[in-house]
Amino acid sequence: MPQITVDYSAELDDTFDRAGFTRALHPLVAETVTTKIAACKTRFRRVEEVVVADAPGGDALVHIDISLLAGRTPEIKARLTESVRELLAAHIGPAAGLTLHLSVEARDLDASYRSA
């Protein structure tokens, strides 16, 4: 815990500094939700096709899902998602001709969650 999943458009491969983002993300998450950096686990999933609304193309997205053990207040989750969105924007370079859509969600893990 936290389990972090980053879905990102394939068009961002060359402009999204995933390593730098993760190095900055884990301390931010750990401090905000009061956990250890060593507990943070992030995986990136490259998405080949993205369609936003009825746009004909030219859109790219990054969506981050942060799953946490239950107990964080809605205010802490909101502070976390806003901070992560700002951090994300700082780690994506210009993507010529693309409209970027950035989103972050923090949610509680199911009570059945176990980790080793």
Image (tube, rainbow, N blue to C red):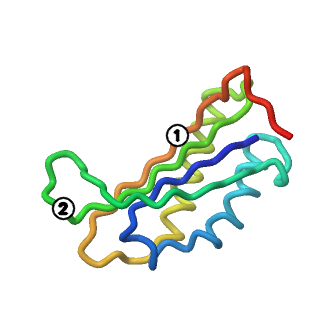
The Cα atoms of the two marked residues, 2 and 1, are separated by 24 Å
Numbered circle sitting on residue 105: 1
- Mark 1 residue type: Glu
Residue 34, horizontal then vertical, whole percent: 81, 41
- Mark 2 residue type: Gly
Residue pictured at 30% horizontal, 55% vertical: 50
Numbered circle sitting on residue 57: 2
Residue pictured at 68% horizontal, 43% vertical: 3
Residues at marks 2 and 1 touching, judged by CB atoms closer than 8 Å: no
Residue 51, horizontal then vertical, whole percent: 25, 52
Q: Secondary structure at mark 1?
A: strand
Residue pictured at 66% horizontal, 54% vertical: 42
Location of the N terminus (image quadrant): top right
Location of the C terminus (image quadrant): top right
Where on the picture, by quarter, is residue 32?
top right
Numbered circle sitting on residue 74: none
Residue placed most toward the observer, 70 or 10: 10
Q: Is residue 111 left or right of residue 98?
A: right
Tell me which numbered mark, 2 or 1, is placed earlier along the sequence: 2
